[in-house]
Amino acid sequence: MTMFHPTTDTYRAGARTMLGEYYTSDTVLREERERVFASNWICVGRESDVAEPGAFVLADVAGESIIIVRDRGAESKVRAFYNVCRHRGTRLCAETTGRFGETIQCPYHAWTYRLDGRLTGAPHMGETEGFSMADYPLHAVALERWEGFLFVNLSKSPEPFATVFAPVNNRFARYNLASLRTVRRIDYDVKANWKLVMQNYSECLHCPTIHPELTTKLPYTSGANDLTEGAFLGGYMEIKAPHESATMSGRACALPLGEFSDADKVRAYYYTLFPTMMLSMHPDYAVFYSVRPVAVDRSAVRCEWMVHPDAPAAPGYNIADAEEFWDRTNRQDWDICARSQAGVSSRAYAPGPYSPRESIPAAWDREYLRVMSAGQ
Ligand code: FES
Ligand SMILES: [Fe+2]
């Protein structure tokens, strides 16, 4: 959704779209699994998804099933483990969400793990010479939290989260993202490569043609990009008076998310967080997306709407107004992404020129290609 602005942008003349194989090749997808999804911090949802001690969700990261669980006990720490038994490798947990008791038990031979990963029961293994339960904890995965979001990194030596997220550390503090409450969630099945979804979110050159309703509230020539190179990209658009927010009615749909400057009261901020998270912040609600590749030509997109925790009980609350606005917009985007997928799959497709108004998708591609070629 973000815009080119001559004073802040780093448009590079000659930027072109990527080769077709990036959108069609299973070899590229396998490479992405290692270089992008198994080596970067991947958003797996919100801390509130596992609010209670014992609560868990399963996340699919780089084709791996990962258990995200809140420990019981004094600390109630959120942890992440591979969903793999240390005995004979069986998948431990089949439910995608739920609540464990004190332990996680393998359905095969009943090896039993505490929620901190320690093995505490292994029937008949005492008869095995040299066996020690201490040697077989669940395989832990690095997990970090930021602004109420949870991220995992499958790498054995992940790049420190604080280093990676330094460009956005405290940048959105005024939106109080950590305390926001998810009130709507929609899962979309998009018939396009995951990168087309990220690129589409990164420009509004398509807004007048694809989103005629959105354009009346967020003029596509308004605003400026303020993160223009690297893993985090985007900027803001202006909400056109008399509209107050990006909603069907144009009215604010919930309490303000924080104390805003006059400028922020009429702005909507849109960012991509490499590789697969997108974050939209409006004065009265925020939306985040997480994108997961299912196949070269298919992506699962989860979209959640978040509001001030007191908003649902306050007068004037109408999140449906924002939900419908983005649900319509999203479906328009997924439709054009599917058409893009069909076109870039053609033998006739060749990289085409980006315009200055597509400086952010061009920067996104640069970051992607950097990650894909790192260490080569
Ligand atoms: S495979 Fe899990 S207990 Fe045997
Ligand atoms: Fe769009």
Image (spheres, rainbow, N blue to C red):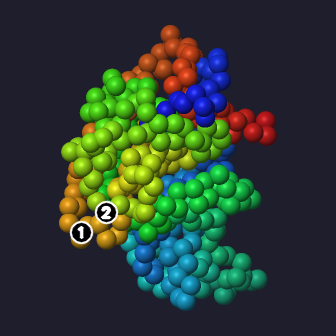
Q: Is residue 153 visible?
A: no
Disc 2 designates what residue? Answer: 255
Identify which residue is drawn at 53% across, 26% down: 358
Q: What amino acid does circle 1 point to? A: Ala
Give the answer, above or below, for where 374 lies relative to 152: above
SS at mark 2 in the image: loop
Give the residue at the far right of this rendering. 375
- Counting other residues with Cα less than 10 Å from the Cα at mark 2, is it few (<14), some (14-19), or many (20 or more)? many
- Residue 266 position within the rendered picture, expressed as x and y whole percent measured from the top left: 38, 47
User: Quadrant of the rendered structure where residue 298 is?
Assistant: top left
Using the image as rendered, state which of residue 174 and residue 35 is in the foreground: 174
Q: Nearer the viewer, residue 87 or 235?
A: 235
Which label belongs to residue 314?
A: 1
Q: Reading the chain from its start, which is encountered first: label 1 or label 2?
A: 2
CA–CA distance between discs 1 and 2? Answer: 7 Å
Q: Tell me the quadrant of ligand 2.
A: top left
Marking on residue 44: none
Name which quarter of the figure residue 222 lies in. top left
Using the image as rendered, state which of residue 221 and residue 272 is in the foreground: 221
